[in-house]
Amino acid sequence: MKDDETNRLSARAARYLAIGAQAGGFAARLAGGRLFGQNFGNAGDGDALALARALGGLKGPLMKAAQLIATIPEALPADYADALASLQSEAPPMGAAFVRRRMAAELGPDWREKFAAFDLHPAAAASLGQVHRAKTLAGEEVACKLQYPDMASAVEADLAQLDLALALHRRLDPAIDARDAVQEVAERLREELDYRREAKHALLYRLMLAEHDEVRVPGVFEALSTGRLLTLDWLQGEKILGVLGAPEEERNAAAKAIFAAWWAPFAQYGVIHGDPHLGNYTVFRQDGAIGGINLLDYGCVRIFSPSFVGGVVQLYRALSAGNRDQIAQAYETWGFRGLNGDLIEALTIWARFILGPLLDDRVRTIADGVKAGAYGRREAALVHAKLREKGPVRIPREFVFMDRAAIGLGGAFLHLAARLNFHALFEAALEDFDPDTLASRQKTALQQIGL
């Protein structure tokens, strides 16, 4: 990252002002008790929706961080969690003058000469940057992801606000201690600022999914990429929301490809895509039918230790066998500490929700009779009730993106109304699973792509 956009005090100060003006002073309102006051957890819908709208317009990381925290059961009040989880990365785009300046800063004043064509109007706008469609001098269609200015400062300012908000939350409603979870979110957000790292993530996914024809991963154009500009293949496809009315067979094909894109890298390499919302996929067709998905974004990727992956597999198998000792041991492998029987029981409510569809050997939806917007709500309420009585529990870092991905994947499958045998798909992903083999495979793959 260039020196003119490191974490600057002036930029952080401007960010604090923006948050105060647009979000009504998120942390200040928390301290005043308007959000987490006498009726904590039952704040008015107007407050929750106003906060969501404000964060959605900030064009920065606080929205992403809040969405991640919102997926942890009762880390936030239910109405705020719902409002924040519903946010989509569709921030207003920056104009042509901004794009010209940014591209010149990244590729030099002659940047236009490096493209045969470049659309100054973004094809998509997200929380940390926006995407432009272009064509290389060799005629290749590419997507240029261009980071907004001063994002390093925005990340640090936003994380400070979020940390204060959750510190107040811990004092008022201590069923969940999310301090370690916030550290995890902070580390991943800082990584997302480094587009060179994201380029390596894309290369990693091309390697991991090379034998999965149902998932397409773009190639990287390194000569047209920097720390704040990432140029990838433009993958032709349709938005997934546009195929919700397709025949069940096609919706199932899209869902099966999404399942493979997430679980195969995790089971074989210990790597997950931590942001599986529908905007990060498009579908492609073969002979008129849906052939699979394009996986578009690689900023939010988590690489786990083989022992942690082994703990997830252990929990899955222990839940299947009803082995309480093995279940408790798996939680300890995940990083939970100081557990007793009551806390294990509370955690197992959530574990059965996350892994339940994988344990059920039948063709089914991901959650029978549940709408996408209500996915996990009942279970979260049960967990919170038990933790308020028997807790608190401190959420380990490793839990955050496992939880985020489970919620995101479940929502995607519910939107698609997919009916699959998730158990059979998961067992296929786990075929010949061995932590030592995974460790060797992971090490080799990371060396190949330079991570």
Image (cartoon, helix red, strand yellow):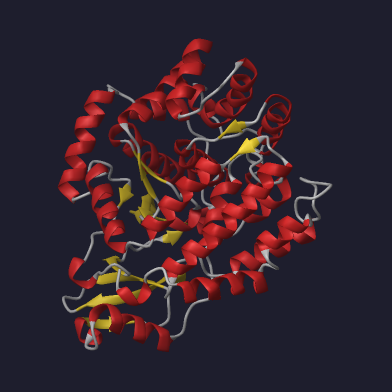
**In the image, 194: left or right of 92?**
left
Where does the image place residue 102, in percent across and percent down from the top left?
Answer: 35, 81
Q: How many marks?
A: 0
Q: Quadrant of residue 353?
A: top right
Please say whether residue 322 is visible from this viewpoint: no
Residue at the image position 62 percent from the left and 45 percent from the top: 372
* Residue 216 % position (x, y): 30, 52
**Residue at horizontal 20 percent and vertical 42 percent from the top:** 445
Please say if 175 is above or below 238.
above
User: Viewer-proximal residue, 119 or 17?
Assistant: 17
Along the line of sight, the residue nearer the viewer: 23 or 89:
23
Above or below, 344 against 96 in this view is above
- In percent of width and height, residue 129 lies at 43, 69
x 29%, y 52%: residue: 201
In the image, taking residue 47 as reference, residue 327 lies left or right, namely: left
Snapshot quadrant of residue 210: top left
231 to the left or right of 191: left
Residue 250, percent from left and from top: 45, 46
